[in-house]
């Protein structure tokens, strides 16, 4: 992999287009670099090519790790890391605090036999107890979701991981590396006692080559010290090796990590495909070979192929560009997310020495300053959500299945875009977006033009640039100290220059919450607006809560008519699911009138404004899912946010159906609140309805309260005195009854019901079923205020990996003490248990019980599958 230094970047001839903000910013982003003429290159679409088999192996390294806490303050309790000693921590190769200096064998003195066995992904923070503010002025609720992390908790802010693995004698001569998809944070990595290096970022992927230190034919030990004392964000970030880890083996002559980059240009009857492939020769000999790349369509059929001969000097990198075309390509779109694959291999010395496989999509994107965003020439309003990466029960160690489910839940809401707030995400999130047709605004964690900042940016762009779902690179988020001045402009210019070098096919943006029209605005291709609530610099704000228009946005457009725009972050409001009264003592926000006091807007206001103005490309609401940390407005009580359209477990809130009404294509009718208001008989209840139908009539105990016409992007409201019974909404389209929705006064909690997200899962040690638990009355209706404590018992080849309920103030344990038992209180009648398969097939039985309630049972069938290759 080519690592660009700040010096080499600044010397490049690539220009960041950091000129006047008034420059034309209409983007038709489908450029390709011309390939250099090469007589050895040619199309081989008709040549028969067998599936490549090479020395390359990519083995999952997730299972069988050992874990132990260290200590941030005391080296004697941190396995003597940093302790004063004669040899010193880093003074000799391999002769550090983990190694016995008198023993030149690879016998390790670092005894991990008493450590806890864990599988990855792993987040130790979610296992910690909840704590209150440790000292005045420090809010662990905001930064860590109430967990015991940080300077005040040295005994739980350092974690050690260790894994022993066998590397066979036959692997001599190969290059061997370990890939980490994500570690939070500050990871110090050793291999067989040798210090490999350190990775600061909690979000950027990283690799260490271990070839020189391997004990072939014997045991090898990977040791990782993870220091989560410092945070990078201002929200819950977790702690540990929380994404996948891999052991990668290649021939010395191989395709570089993230080395294949596919660009497409749609033409009248075909698509021109340009493939840039970076080849590395990590040997002492000059190498000659041929690169062969095949393109497979969404059905796996070969539709094009191309080859190119090369020679490469020892220890050099070489980038080859080849071009071919696809006749009548199947385009990637939101509705039909068709994916192609480029399968490449290197032939040298009469044999296949390496191969690589990368998915891509054929599509075009365009941001127009007056008309918004276009995908494949079709206008698309961006209907997006911002999302952090933690989830109920599991913290940031999110299984692949749940990543996929989270994308699916937002697609079902009508969302078509996902902002990776505020960091590079797990590759599995982008894979899910590719498969399901979800656009992505991909954001880097650090706005910086330092070597560290540029390295994090480079790793994100190189890893993710083949994903057709990504339409924007976001280089900053609310950098209020610098976003509006010359320093910020210089930093973003350097970052943009690198981004354009690595990927010239997409625009860059910055999520700005001030300084619009200055600083970074003159550099980014698409202007991002976070919570626009003021005029241009030097002008008074004309925004008023509930005002019919944002005149400030229109002023910006008039002043900078060639600047495309997007709502990079907009206000969803705050509400706890199923709560309809403000409750500061319990930390619950008022669910009826979701508002953002800091932002002076809410879902209906922002979406009406963006929907009505063609020059606005659309926006990303804050947020799709609740997340731990940032528990305003009641951060003295709550431990998680309340801004989501879905709660932390993925249970929809009422606001979910607002977006589904106006973002989706199907008829929607959602009536709220519940109708259990004992003690408030005769008092007026605020009754609301989200719908995209023409008219709704409301009934209370069979009596009509009147019909009301529906206004686009709005809701309907009635007030009625409470009387036990039922409210019912009847929705009409073109005069015809289309949908009804009903809320009934339920009886006391009487029984439990289980609703698995998956009734069949793979017996691969990874797959998960999220089982929703309903507390029901005797008639099978969810009791909307139930808070019964539910106990779970698992039998069979699986384990409980977490529980949750979506309660923003709940302090109960998310992780079970044992893999087969757990407990969680219901919140607004619901809770959830997360069950993961082992590698053994068979039925997994979950029993749920609660005092005084009828129990429930669910059976998940774990089926035999081909398990992806992993380290034994």
Image: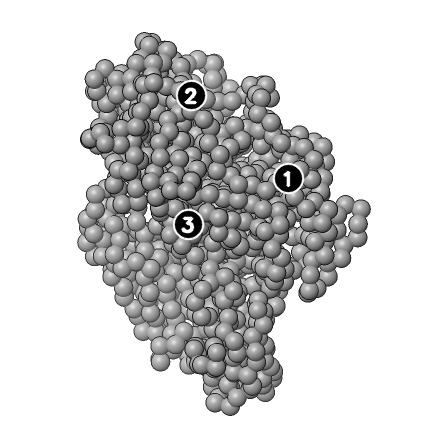
Where is residue 800 drawn, in percent x and y? 33, 53
Q: Which residue corresponds to the image point at 69% horizontal and 49% vertical from the top-left?
A: 557
Question: In the image, is residue 845 above or below residue 459?
Answer: below
Select label 3 or label 2 by which is in front.
Answer: 2
Q: Which of marks 1 and 3 is nearer the N terminus?
A: 1
> Seen from this angle, which residue lies furthest bottom?
703
> Seen from this angle, which residue lies furthest front?
268
Cα distance, mark 2 to mark 1? 30 Å
Cα distance, mark 3 to mark 2? 31 Å
Select label 1 or label 3 by which is in front.
Answer: 1
Cα distance, mark 1 to mark 3? 26 Å
Q: Which residue corresponds to the image point at 35% horizontal and 46% vertical from the top-left?
A: 330
Q: Which of marks 3 and 2 is nearer the N terminus?
A: 2
According to the image, label 3 marks what residue?
A: 333
Q: Earlier in the sequence, mark 2 or mark 1?
A: 1
The way the protein has been coloured in the rendering is one colour
Where is residue 674 drawn, in percent x and y? 49, 76
Front position in the image: 345 or 672? 345
Where is residue 783 drawn, in percent x and y? 43, 74
According to the image, label 2 marks what residue?
A: 36
According to the image, label 1 marks what residue?
A: 24
The reply to whether residue 443 is visible in this rendering is no
Check disc 3: other Cα within 10 Å, few if <14, some if 14-19, many if 20+.
many
Q: Is mark 1 on a helix, strand or loop?
A: loop
Check disc 1: other Cα within 10 Å, few if <14, some if 14-19, many if 20+.
some
Front position in the image: 695 or 169? 695
Q: Is mark 3 on a helix, strand or loop?
A: loop
């Amino acid at each position: 992999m080519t690592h660009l230094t700040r010096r080499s970047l600044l010397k490049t001839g690539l220009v960041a287009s950091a000129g006047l903000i008034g420059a034309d910013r209409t983007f038709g982003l489908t450029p390709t670099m011309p390939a250099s003429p090469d007589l050895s290159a040619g199309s081989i679409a008709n040549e028969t090519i067998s599936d490549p088999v090479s020395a390359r192996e990519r083995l999952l390294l997730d299972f069988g790790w050992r874990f132990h806490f260290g200590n941030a303050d005391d080296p004697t309790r941190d396995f003597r890391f940093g302790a004063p000693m004669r040899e010193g921590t880093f003074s000799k190769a391999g002769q550090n605090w983990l190694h016995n200096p008198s023993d030149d064998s690879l016998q390790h003195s670092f005894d991990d036999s008493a450590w806890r066995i864990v599988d990855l992904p792993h987040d130790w923070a979610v296992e910690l107890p909840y704590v209150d503010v440790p000292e005045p002025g420090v809010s662990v609720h905001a930064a860590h979701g109430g967990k015991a992390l940080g300077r005040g908790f040295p005994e739980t802010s350092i974690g050690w991981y260790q894994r022993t693995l066998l590397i066979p004698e036959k692997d001599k001569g190969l290059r061997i590396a370990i890939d980490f998809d994500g570690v939070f944070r500050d990871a110090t990595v050793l291999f067989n006692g040798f210090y490999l290096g350190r990775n600061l970022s909690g979000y950027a992927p990283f690799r260490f080559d271990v070839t020189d230190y391997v004990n072939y034919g014997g045991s090898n030990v990977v040791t990782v010290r993870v220091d989560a004392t410092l945070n990078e964000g201002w929200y819950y970030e977790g702690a540990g090796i929380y994404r996948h880890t891999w052991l990668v083996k290649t021939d010395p002559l191989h395709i570089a990590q993230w080395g294949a980059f596919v660009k497409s240009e749609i033409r009248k009857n075909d698509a021109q495909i340009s493939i840039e492939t970076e080849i590395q020769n990590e040997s002492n000999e000059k190498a000659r070979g041929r690169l062969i790349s095949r393109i497979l369509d969404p059905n796996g059929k070969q539709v094009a192929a191309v080859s190119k001969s090369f020679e490469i000097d020892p220890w050099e990198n070489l980038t080859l560009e080849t071009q071919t075309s696809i006749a009548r390509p199947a385009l990637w779109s939101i509705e039909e997310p068709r994916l192609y694959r480029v399968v490449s291999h290197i032939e040298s010395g009469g044999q296949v020495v390496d191969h690589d496989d990368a998915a891509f999509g054929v599509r075009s994107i365009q941001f127009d300053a007056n008309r918004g965003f276009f995908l494949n020439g079709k206008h698309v309003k961006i209907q997006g959500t911002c999302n952090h990466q933690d989830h109920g029960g599991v913290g940031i160690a999110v299984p692949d299945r749940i990543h996929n489910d989270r994308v699916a839940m937002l697609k079902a809401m009508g969302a078509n875009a996902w902002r990776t707030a505020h960091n590079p995400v797990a590759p599995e999130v982008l894979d899910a977006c590719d498969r399901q047709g979800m656009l992505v605004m991909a954001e880097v964690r650090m706005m910086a033009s330092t070597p560290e900042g540029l390295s994090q940016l480079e790793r994100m762009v190189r890893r993710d640039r083949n994903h057709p779902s990504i339409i924007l690179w976001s280089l900053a988020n609310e950098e209020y100290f610098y976003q509006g001045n010359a320093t910020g402009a210089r930093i973003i210019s350097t970052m943009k220059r690198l981004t354009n070098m690595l990927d010239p096919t997409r625009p860059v943006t910055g999520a700005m919450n001030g300084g619009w029209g200055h600083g970074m605005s003159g550099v980014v291709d698409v202007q991002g607006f976070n919570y626009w609530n003021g005029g241009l610099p030097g002008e008074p704000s004309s925004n008023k809560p509930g005002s019919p228009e944002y005149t400030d946005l229109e002023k910006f457009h008039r002043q900078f008519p060639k600047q495309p725009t997007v709502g990079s972050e907009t206000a969803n409001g705050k509400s706890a699911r199923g709560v309809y009264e403000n409750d500061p003592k319990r930390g619950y926000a008022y669910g009826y009138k979701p508002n953002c006091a800091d932002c002076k807007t809410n879902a209906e206001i922002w979406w009406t404004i963006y929907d009505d103005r063609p020059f606005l490309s659309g926006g990303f609401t804050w947020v799709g899912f609740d997340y731990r940390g940032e528990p305003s407005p009641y951060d003295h009580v709550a431990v998680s946010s309340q801004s989501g359209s879905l709660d932390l477990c993925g249970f929809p809130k009422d606001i979910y159906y607002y977006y589904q009404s106006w973002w989706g294509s199907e008829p929607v009718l959602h009536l709220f609140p519940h109708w259990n208001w004992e003690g408030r008989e005769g008092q007026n209840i605020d009754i609301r309805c989200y719908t995209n139908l023409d008219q709704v009539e409301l009934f209370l105990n069979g009596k009509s309260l009147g019909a009301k016409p529906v206004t686009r992007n709005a809701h309907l409201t009635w007030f009625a005195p409470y009387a036990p019974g039922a409210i019912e909404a009847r929705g009409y389209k073109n005069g015809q009854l289309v949908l009804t929705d009903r809320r009934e006064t339920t009886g006391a909690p009487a029984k439990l019901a289980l609703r698995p997200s998956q009734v069949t899962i793979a017996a691969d040690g990874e797959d998960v079923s999220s089982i929703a638990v309903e507390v029901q009355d005797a008639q099978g209706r969810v009791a909307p205020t139930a808070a019964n404590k539910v106990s779970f018992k698992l039998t069979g080849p699986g384990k409980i990996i977490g529980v949750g309920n979506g309660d923003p103030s709940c302090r109960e344990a998310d992780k079970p003490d044992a893999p087969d038992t757990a407990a969680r209180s219901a919140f607004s009648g619901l809770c959830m248990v997360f069950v993961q398969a082992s590698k053994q097939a068979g039925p997994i039985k979950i029993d749920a019980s609660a005092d005084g309630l009828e129990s429930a049972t669910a059976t998940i069938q774990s089926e035999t599958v081909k398990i992806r290759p992993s380290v034994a």
